[in-house]
Amino acid sequence: MFPEEIREDLADALARLDLGVSLSMPLSRPMPSIGKGVHELRLKDASGIYRIIYFLWEKERIYLLHAFKKKSQKTLKANLDLAKRRLKGVLR
């Protein structure tokens, strides 16, 4: 489970996305290597750095594909592959 501060930041970011606000760096960045419309929320607190990979479908739906705590500088391939598989499931 993510810490309360991270959950609050996530809820705030999702509310902004739901209102149609376009998020940018440093909070969010595109992830074209996973797919078109896929972005990564970048959150951190005293306990660590967290990433939430999400997909915006026609600005009407937000799909959270994967969430994890970063343990190294580079995002692990397993995390990216899981997000890709989940995106394929959404697009079916």
Image (cartoon, rainbow, N blue to C red):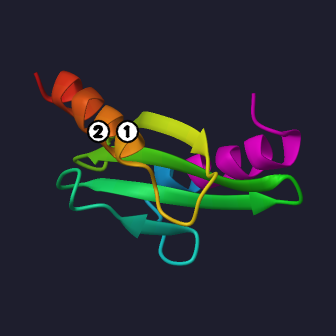
The picture places residue 67, in percent across and down from the top left corner, at: 54, 38
Kind of element beneath mark 1:
helix
Which quadrant: the N terminus?
A: top right
> What's the magenta bit mostly, secondary-structure-wise?
helix
Query: In front here: 8 or 74?
Result: 74
Residue 22, visible in the rendered structure: no
The residue positioned 33% from the left and 32% from the top of the image is 82
Kind of element beneath mark 2:
helix
Look at mark 1 in the image and give the residue it sits on.
78
Tell me if residue 8 is in the magenta stretch: yes
The picture places residue 35, in percent across and down from the top left corner, at: 19, 51
Type of the residue with mark 2: Asp
The picture places residue 88, in percent across and down from the top left corner, at: 16, 29
Magenta stretch, residue numbers: 1-15
Picture quarter containing residue 36? bottom left
Q: Which numbered dot is residue 27?
A: none
Tell me if residue 22 is in the magenta stretch: no
Look at mark 2 in the image and give the residue it sits on.
81
Q: Residues within 10 Å of mark 1 (few under 14, many from 20)?
A: few
